[in-house]
Amino acid sequence: MYMFIFGLIIGALAGVIGGFYGARAYMKKYFQDNPPVNEDMLRTMMLSMGAKPSEKKLNQMMQQMKTSQKKAK
């Protein structure tokens, strides 16, 4: 009887830990494939702040964001 309860507890803990790391890996891959900010969003943000975005400036900002993402890993 005690072994059955112990097995259930161990199984539940393993499921929670496995689920956490599985979801974490999935979200990392999702955000790597679909970054939350793209050039159109940057362009819209710059226009809303009153700055006229040039392609050069947009490319620089996107490159900085990609570099900072790689450093964060």
Image (cartoon, rainbow, N blue to C red):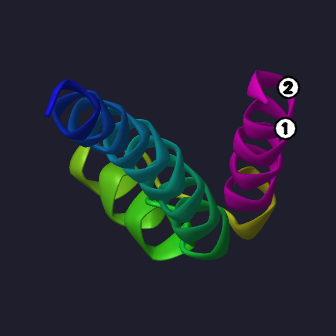
Relative side of 27 to 8, left or right: right
Residues at marks 1 and 2 touching, judged by CB atoms closer than 8 Å: yes
* Residue 59 quadrant: bottom right
- Label 2's element? helix
Relative side of 14 to 11, left or right: right
Q: Amino acid at mark 1?
A: Lys
* Crowd rating for badge 2 (residues with CA inside 10 Å; few <14, some 14–19, many 20+): few
* Residue 7 quadrant: top left
Q: Is residue 65 above or below residue 59?
A: above
Relative side of 17 to 4, left or right: right
- The magenta region covers 58-73
Residue 63 lies within the magenta run: yes
> Residue at 29% of width from left, 31% of height from top?
3
* Residue 71 quadrant: top right
Query: x%, y% of residue 63?
Result: 83, 49
**Residue placed under numbered mark 2 in the picture:** 71
Disc number for residue 21? none
Q: Amino acid at mark 2?
A: Lys
Residue situated in front as seen by the camera: 23 or 42: 23
Residue situated in front as seen by the camera: 51 or 44: 44
Disc number for residue 70? 1
> Residue at 34% of width from left, 44% of height from top?
11
Residue 8 lies within the magenta run: no
Q: Main secondary structure of the magenta part?
A: helix
